[in-house]
Image: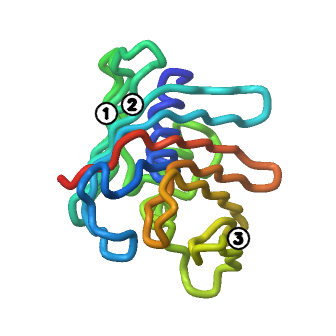
């Protein structure tokens, strides 16, 4: 169970940070659809903390995440599509659920906003969210659905993708994501 937690966390964290779009040849933030990213994450809840690396590939409605230990060993692979969410751990254990949120709740014991993560990693809050913009007009702080997301950018361009995200909820987990590389799939 403790080995699956970082994997599920990675699903959530993949959305938290980024390298400037010019580094990976991605279009401006508002035009990005499918993407691939590599980054580091930490997930903290109560007294538990999990950290590692992740690789996330998003194509259409399918997400493929690989979660690695801080030392580079594969911990788990997660595939989420319109039909199911499946986690395959390095120890051979496989878990499935109807969706990513159900899978994470089963493995972690608490909810993570996976349905919103892909939009959050691209700094695209839903309409109705409370947004505080930075001097370039980019989201710097977002409050949405009981979650608070803080952004940081490595690139000064107004259309830059975020490089860091912190996702928190009162009484809930804190996810920190540092995206080291953005790519087109």
Q: Is residue 128 above or below residue 77?
A: below
Q: Is residue 70 visible?
A: yes
Q: Is residue 177 left or right of residue 179?
A: right
Q: Which mark is residue 49?
A: none
Q: What's the distance in space between the residues labelled 1 and 2, CA to CA?
A: 6 Å
Residue holding disc 2: 67
Residue at (51% x, 45% y) in the render: 13
Q: Is residue 82 visible?
A: no
Q: Is residue 87 above or below residue 19?
A: above
Neighbourhood count class around disc 3 (C-alpha, 10 Å): few under 14, some 14–19, many 20 upward? some
Q: Is residue 87 above or below residue 125?
A: above
Q: What's the distance in space between the residues labelled 1 and 3, CA to CA?
A: 30 Å
Residue at (47% x, 63% y) in the render: 115
Q: Which mark is residue 77?
A: 1
Q: Residue 40: give x, y in percent of width and height.
A: 48, 33
Q: Which mark is residue 143?
A: 3
């Amino acid at each position: 169970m403790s080995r699956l937690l970082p994997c599920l966390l990675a699903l959530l964290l993949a959305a938290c940070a980024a390298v400037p779009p010019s580094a990976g040849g991605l279009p401006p933030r508002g035009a990005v659809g499918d993407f691939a990213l590599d980054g580091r994450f930490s997930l903290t809840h109560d007294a538990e903390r999990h950290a590692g690396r992740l690789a996330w590939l998003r194509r259409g409605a399918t997400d493929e995440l690989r979660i690695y230990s801080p030392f580079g060993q594969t911990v788990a692979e997660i595939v989420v599509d319109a039909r199911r969410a499946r986690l395959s751990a390095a120890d051979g254990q496989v878990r499935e659920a109807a969706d990513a949120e159900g899978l994470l709740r089963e493995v972690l014991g608490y909810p993570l906003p996976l349905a919103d993560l892909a939009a959050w990693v691209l700094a695209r809050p839903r309409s109705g969210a409370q947004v505080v913009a930075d001097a370039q007009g980019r989201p710097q702080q977002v409050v949405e659905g009981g979650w608070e997301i803080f952004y940081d950018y490595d690139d000064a361009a107004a259309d830059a993708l975020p490089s860091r995200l912190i996702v928190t909820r009162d009484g809930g987990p804190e996810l920190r994501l540092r995206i080291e590389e953005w790519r087109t799939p």
